[in-house]
Amino acid sequence: MEINQNVPNIQMIVSPPHDLQTWWRNIRVAHGVEVKQHLGSLMSLIGIQANKTFTKLLIEFWDPASVTFNFLDFEMTPTLEEICGFTDLPFEGRMPVLPSFISGEKFLHILGFNVYPVLRNVENDRVKFDFLFQRFGRRESFERHQGEFACDRGRWEKMRPQVFAIALLGILVFPKRAYRININLLPPVMNIFSGPDELTLVPMILAEMLRALSACSRGHNCFEGCNLLLQLWAVEHFYTRPPIMDYCIDARSRIQSHTERMRYWHGPTGAEEWYTFLVQLTGDAVQWKYPWLSGRPLVRTANLYFIELIGLEGIQPYAPLRVLRQFGVTQDVPVWSRMALHEGNYDRLVPMARVRNLQREWLNMITIGMGNESWCTPEYYAWYNVGALALLPTEDGFDGFTDYDVADWLTVEVLPLMNVNNDMYRKVVLGSVNHLIQLVEEEDPAESDEPMEEDPEEDPEWDAERDLAIEIEPEKSPEYTPAGPSKEDMEVQSEHRPTVHGIEEGPEYDPEAGWTDTEEEPEYDPGPDYDPAYDRDDNDGPTWP
């Protein structure tokens, strides 16, 4: 585990502006149903307070090469299914929404403005939040700024929920510095609100979150992903709890009920406590699978060992095969490849041919069934601890999820050095390699109360070649003779024969005399009162007077 301690002081959303809450209250009655239909529970992020210290420390454990958080003995990353569960956004069976770059003039024109009088409010593809709130956030905003609009009040009222969605996404989900909003959010929002019900925002949200983690780990000082969702995701994984605690929560959104689920967790508070907690965190101390997670997770494409997510400002690789335990599936050595070549910024030019091809492939993703055993194999621990990225990537062409060539090599070459056997992970819910080694030490035969089985190799009279020939292939042994009872008789009498290891005792077989008992029965003694003169009946037993 390598910790990146060069992460700068990062700017991020700590709490949403008060005017955003006011805006939501003002349109909730008239447009609340429409907004929730397309944005799910994202409005609930308005009530979340960010823990900036925790998020900054968490970024220190992020590895852009593997697109995962690297802790002491395990990897973890936000998944599409988890983000979908938190946000209640439509996802299953839908394709990702596509990005698009537009000019400031076009942005203002679509919103119904007279372009040139207000064009100065758009700069470098950014528009101030306050500009949009003053013109769409209140019921009387149209009358106050009517001279700036080229549309009537009916069209203005129709645009209000979409402009609110742009503001919400631009402040909390895809944030920029100083409450500036990316005007390129307009095309995705319009496609979701006005287009057919076949598009989803979930891949774009996750893509920008992962891109922000990688950018900040490399020195960027502004987190331009949804740090509020990242915080909820991490804290709920770090709090182990019985599943019933999640099912007892009421039917509100999982963002709203987050505080109630965490009410019994006494986690770290300050920076030092959080750092110590994260450094010492092991796989047996996390909540691997959320109890409410369901469905069939997307894990890879037909040609790649990962998934390329279409972000708002770039394409981001995502490798769920490395974190199968978050789906309740046993983690083995994953097939993997270097993903850095698949990262890319649009730089104001979206590669439409590529993103449309990724969109078409979306419904043909390879999925896996959700499980309930968040374990892993000893080979995975060996693979993780020897430095997964130091090994060669998996060769192209594997159809499954596990790199069996590397797993077999680890079984033969590495696990014996770690005192770990292949069957041990079935006996315990694994936490770490140290846990396994400790288990081996506790089962040391030298300290066991059970009698040790003698090693036949220490017996000077033991002939391995001869005895193995008798045990395994008796018909090829020179000491074997087929004389004796028939095969059917031998099968019937097999219950009484001595086993190979001498566990059972019974009659022995003599090729000439047949089956004989090992001990002769003693002769019957009738006792001192027996008189042979009175023994006149036909029975074999004695007769007493």
Image (cartoon, helix red, strand yellow):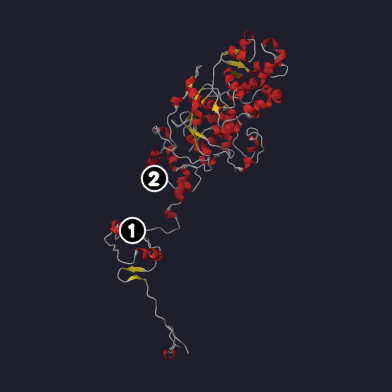
Q: Name the spot of residue 445 as percent of width and height, x first.
A: 42, 54
Q: Secondary structure at mark 2?
A: helix
User: For the residue marked with disc 2, what is the amino acid?
Assistant: Pro
- Residue farthest left in this picture: 478
- Is residue 6 among what the camera can see? no
Quarter-wise, where is residue 206 in the image?
A: top right
Q: Residues within 10 Å of mark 2 (few under 14, many from 20)?
A: few
Q: Residue under circle 1?
A: 471
Q: Residues within 10 Å of mark 1 (few under 14, many from 20)?
A: few
Q: Name the spot of residue 389 as percent of width and height, x first.
A: 42, 32
**Is label 1 in contact with label 2 (beta carbons under 8 Å)?**
no
- Is residue 234 among what the camera can see? yes
User: For the residue marked with disc 1, what is the amino acid?
Assistant: Glu
Q: Along the line of sight, which residue is nearer the eye, 267 or 241?
A: 241
Q: Is residue 198 left or right of residue 470?
A: right
Q: Name the spot of residue 330 as percent of width and height, x first.
A: 49, 41
Q: Residue under circle 2?
A: 416
Q: Is residue 460 left or right of residue 148?
A: left
Q: Along the line of sight, which residue is nearer the eye, 5 or 164?
A: 164
Q: Is residue 209 left or right of residue 15?
A: left
Residue at horizontal 69%, vertical 13%? 152
